[in-house]
Image (cartoon, rainbow, N blue to C red):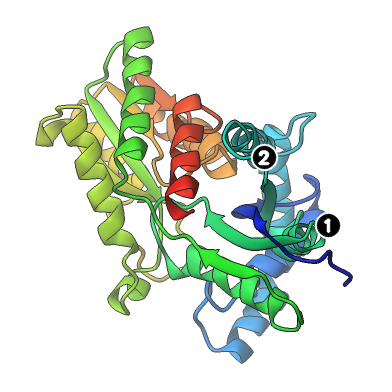
Amino acid sequence: MTAARPNNRRTGVLVSNLGTPDAPTPAALRRYLAEFLSDTRVIEKPRWLWKIILYGIILNIRPRRAAKAYQSVWTENGSPLMHHSTQQANALQQALNDNDSDIIVKLAMRYGNPSIAQGLQELMAEGVGRILVLPLYPQYSATTTASTYDAVFNTVKNTRNVPEIYLLGDYHQHEQYINALANSIREQWDRHGQSEKLMMSFHGLPKSYVTAGDPYQCQCQQTAELLAHKLQLADNQWRCTFQSRFGVEEWLQPYTDKTLEAWAKSGIKSVDVVCPGFSADCLETVEEIGVENRDLFIGAGGESFNYIPCLNERADHIDLLAQIIKSAL
């Protein structure tokens, strides 16, 4: 790789999210899932055993099912995650340009395209003197944030002239983050009224990972408590739950789907659901929450299910991300 001479005044910002397949097809899903599920940070099983399961079973079954789900949410701009992530990166570039024209923002995905390697190489080709890596995961987990760090280190380990690299972490307690979430929920309530319950659904994680020391569950709970306090909710008006479990082992509880079903059967007729752990809407929010879990709640006796979108490219969200970067600088 040929890079420009580093300019210590120029700063690169690499904003990263999980990733998305290139197309809503079984072949594209197979490539994406093979990369994602081969990450030892994501699946902590013996490699020999997991390869048999992954290539012998999962990649022969799951891509076709997942492709149908992606097809239901795909737009002319691609997947929801790619669309919103691109908008976020563009808005963040504009926000930072208002103060410093020597900051360059690049978007990267941990899995799929544009890759972290591509983003870093483009920034180094611009001759930046330092790079700030901002994983767009409000809560830290080894499966997401640390995996992003791994990809960064693997990219630069054979680069001769490495710029200064700063790894930014979680922001689960950041005041502007909590305020932005509260603003989005209040706007929903102003438009449609407040439901009986507010569910804060976070992506799940195997319980064994937390037992081994991952701080993710604790940070999710802290975010939920801060948000409930900001909204002045009583304890019986909200709950923190976990979605998207995979496989047969126990994951963090309470489970989102089981909780919604139990609420409906107990007589709860209306719920609002927000996903504070996702910085941008994606398959897990638009389809899993907005369609699958909605149908589950209504089918169990509920009457009103309102999904509150992720912060996406909201101005207060972009202001938060810009502030995180400015503080690091």
Q: Position of residue 139 (x, y in %)?
A: 38, 55
Judge left or right: residue 3 versus residue 302.
Answer: right
- Quick one: 190 or 23, which is closer to the camera? 190
- SS label for mark 1: helix
**CA separation in Å, label 2 and label 1:** 41 Å
In the image, what residue type sits under mark 1?
Ala
- The image quarter in which residue 231 lies: top left
Residue at horizontal 51%, vertical 65%?
167
| 299 over 17 or under it: above or below | above
Judge left or right: residue 264 versus residue 78.
Answer: left
In the image, what residue type sits under mark 2?
Ser
For residue 101, the mark is: 2
- The image quarter in which residue 164 lies: bottom right
The extreme top residue here reads: 191
Judge left or right: residue 140 versus residue 160.
Answer: left
| 305 over 199 or under it: above or below | above
Residue at horizontal 62%, vertical 61%?
131
Q: Does any portion of residue 7 appear in the rendered image?
A: yes
Q: Quadrant of the N terminus?
A: bottom right
Q: Nearer the viewer, mark 2 or mark 1?
A: 2
- Quick one: 248 or 199, which is closer to the camera? 199
- Quick one: 107 or 226, which is closer to the camera? 107
Q: Earlier in the sequence, mark 2 or mark 1?
A: 1
Q: Does any portion of residue 264 appear in the rendered image?
A: no
Q: Are marks 2 and 1 in contact (CB under 8 Å)?
A: no
Crowding near the residue tagged with mark 1, few <14, some 14–19, many ≥20 C-alpha atoms within 10 Å = some
- The image quarter in which residue 251 lies: bottom left
For label 1, the residue is 27
- SS label for mark 2: loop
